[in-house]
Image: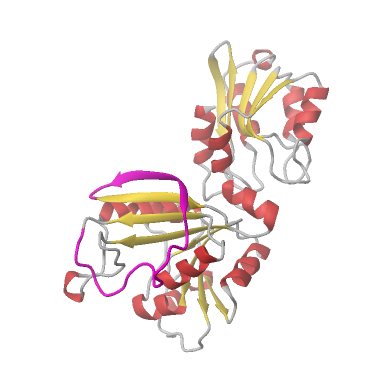
Amino acid sequence: MKIALHEGAKGLGLTSPNPPVGAVLVKDDHILGRGWHRKAGEAHAEVVAIEDALGRCSPDDLKKATLYVTLEPCSTTGRTGACTDLIQLHQIGRVVIGTVDPNPAHAGAGIKILEKAGVEVITGCREDEAKHLIRFFAKHITTGRPWVIAKTAITLDGRTTLRSEDGSWITGKAALDDVQKLRRQIDAILIGGETLRRDDPRLTLRGDFAKDRPQPWRVVLTAMKDLPTDAKLFTDEHHERTMILRGASLEKSLDLLGDQGVCSVMIESGGRLMAHGLANDLIDEVVIYLAPILGGGDTRLMPVDRIVADLCDVTYQQIGRDFRVTGFPKRRP
C-alpha cells in the first residue's frame, strides 16, 4: 500500500475534480504492475496497473493476484468503465483498499460487488494516509465546498513583512519552491483586494511546476471596486484564469467556488482574512513557513489579540534555512 500511495500522490493537482488514486498489482510477493490516475476522464489507477501488468505478463498471471488500491474501486460506468468489472474479468483474487469512497452515492458499493463475486476484500490499510491523499475530493463531494489551506510566511517575531530596506521575501528559495509544489496540488489561490493592491502578486505556477496542468484559478475577494486595472492578475498571459468575487463573504465565496467544481483553495492573503477563516471554522489546513529572522516589518500575522485556532496533527519540516509548520484546526463544538 505504501507504493500505491506513492503512485497516487503523482496525481495531486492533475485529477481534479476526481481524487488522486494509486494502485499496485502483486502476486507471490512480486509486483506485476502499478499505476496512478492521471486526469479526470482518463483511465483509473486500477486500469493502468492492470494494463501495466499485461504489458509484461500473460492474463493467466493476473488470476488470484492481489490488487492494492488507495481508494475503493468504482462500481459505475461514467467516462470510463467500472473498475469492479475489470477486476472480476481478470479474476483478481484479493483487493486491499486504503479507504472507502467518501461519495455517499457510491460508498461501499464497489466492496459489496466484489465480495458478492467471491473476491476477498480488505479495507482500512494505511487508512489515514489514504484519506489524506483524497482530502480535497472528500471535502468537496460531501459538503460542496473546497478544502481550504491557509498559507503564510512569518519571521520569528510573528511578522509577515520585512523592513523596506530588507527586501520583500521572508523565506529562502527552497521554501519558495515548496510553495510552488503546494500550488501545483490545488485548484485555486484566493487573496483579498488589499493584498492585490499592496503586493501585485502573480500567483502562478512556474517552470516545471506548471507542466501538464492548467494554472490555478486566481481569485480576488474584495468589497471595493478600485482594483488596479494594470495588476499582473489582469494583464499577464494567464489573465483568463483570474476571477473577482466582489461583495461576497469568505463563506459565500467558498460556496460559489465549490459550485464551479473547485475542490481545493489556498488562501495566500493577509492575516485578517486568515483570522476570519479560522475564527469561523472555514479553514481545514494551515501551512506556515517560519524564517529565522528577527526584527521583521510592521505587519503581524494575527491582527487580533486572541487565539483563534488550536492546531492538531502538527508536523514540522526544515525547508532549506526555513521551517514549514503544517497543522489542522480543531473544529469548535
Quarter of the N terminus within the rendering? top right
Instruction: Residue at 68% x, 34% y: name it.
Output: 72
Residue that extends furthest to the left in the rendered view of this protein: 165
243 lies left or right of 155: right
Task: Confirm whether the magenta stretch covers residue 117.
Answer: no
Compared with 333, 114 (above or below) is above
Instruction: Residue at 60% x, 60% y: name it.
Output: 262
Q: Looking at the image, which is closer to me, 48 or 158?
A: 158
Q: Position of residue 260 (x, y in %)?
A: 65, 64
Quarter of the C terminus within the rendering? bottom right
Q: Looking at the image, which is closer to me, 127 or 74?
A: 127
208 lies left or right of 134: left
- Is residue 176 visible to us here? no
Residue that extends furthest to the top in the rendered view of this protein: 28
326 lies left or right of 40: left
Q: Position of residue 261 (x, y in %)?
A: 65, 60
- Please report the bounds of the magenta region as a residue range: 293-321
- Is residue 289 visible to us here? yes
Marks counted in the figure total: 0
Residue that extends furthest to the bottom in the rendered view of this protein: 226
Residue that extends furthest to the right in the rendered view of this protein: 116
Q: Position of residue 13 (x, y in %)?
A: 52, 50
Q: How is the image coloured?
A: secondary structure
Q: Quadrant of residue 21?
A: top right
Please, what is the dominant secondary structure of the magenta stretch?
A: loop
Q: Position of residue 236 (x, y in %)?
A: 42, 73
Compared with 317, 285 (above or below) is below
Instruction: Residue at 52% x, 33% y: name it.
Output: 5
Task: Confirm whether the magenta stretch covers residue 318.
Answer: yes
